[in-house]
Amino acid sequence: MSQVSRQQCEDLMRMAMGTRESSSANPHGNLWPAQKSGANSNSTVEEAFSSLLTGIVCDALANALGRYVLDILASKGLLDDSDNPKQFDRGLQSLFGNGASVLERIVVKDLYRRLSIPYNSDAGFDYEKSLETAKEVCFVESRLK
Amino acid sequence: MSGGEILSTLLASEVRGDLLILFHKNPGLIDTVDGIARRIGRTTITVISDLRELLLLGILKQKRIGASEVVFLDRARDREILELVANHLKTVQIGGAR
């Protein structure tokens, strides 16, 4: 996967936010593009989810630790793995230690808020499982639309 | 305090992460502890110790306005702290080696 620069990060954020804002193109106001058929549809949802997640990760890091830190993390390639939970978790752990789980919770909380999935801070937390749940919701939502 | 220690302090809990995001998204925010807790969807008792840590670090400041004690972001100190964190992160490699 290619390196994610801050500019790309900002573009992804705009894309992710834009899908929600463009109500004329998407009367349901959901995050997902108009449905295509079969495997094409799955990959479209997959791509939309990946863009949304990368945008949220950039947003979380920039809002928590500032744009400069986001730039550094992007230059280190951390954001290249933002849609691969295992790799991303490993990268975060090596940079932030125990703080990694705090950042992951922030990401999941925002992701769940955007997908209208209830989030419980007190419940046990698994980043990978949380993303799987979110992805499932996206697939179900895209089929229903 | 080193950049690494500051980073550990900043990201010691989910509440602290929420507080950082609240103030970075709203750098001009001035509110009471109760108000801040409400803004991040928590109770005063659950945020008080994390707020105290951020006050000790200097990222947040406290002052009295009328009858209320309010908390706000010290932008200059925040910049300083985030720069220390950034400089620390520059020296850390993904994968653990330093």
Image (cartoon, grey):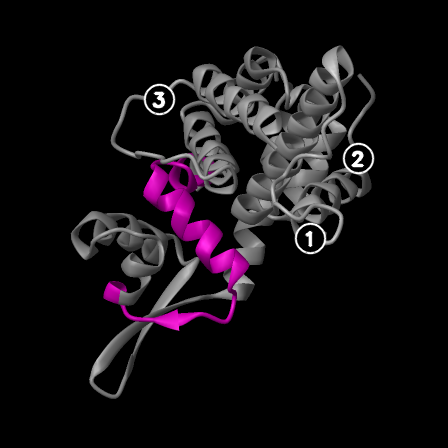
> How far is mark 1 from mark 3, CA to CA?
34 Å
Looking at the rendering, the stretch of residues picked out in magenta corresponds to B6-34
Q: Is residue B28 above or below residue A102?
A: below
Mark 2 or 3, which is nearer the eye? 3
Q: Disc 1 marks which residue?
A: A23
Of all chains, the one bearing label 1 is A
Same chain for mark 2 and mark 3? The answer is yes
Q: Estimate how packed mark 2 is, as few (under 14), some (14 to 19) or many (20 or more) residues with alpha carbons within 10 Å.
A: some
The crowding category of the residue bearing disc 1, from other C-alpha atoms within 10 Å (few below 14, some 14 to 19, many at least 20), is: few
Q: Is residue A25 above or below residue B27?
A: above
Q: Is residue A57 above or below residue A92?
A: below
Residue A5 is tagged as: 2
Horizontal relation, residue B63 to residue A58: left or right: left
**Element carrying mark 2:** loop
Which residue matches tag 3? A125
- Residue B18 magenta: yes
| Residue A79 on image: x %, y % | 68, 27
User: Of callouts 1 and 3, which one flags the residue occurring earlier in the amino acid sequence?
Assistant: 1
**Residue shown at 55%/41% (left/top)?**
A60
Amino acid identity at mark 3: Phe
Q: Which residue occupies the foreground of this view, B97 or A45?
A: A45
Q: Amino acid at mark 2?
A: Ser
Chain-order first, disc 2 or disc 1: 2
> Which quadrant: the C terminus of chain B?
top right
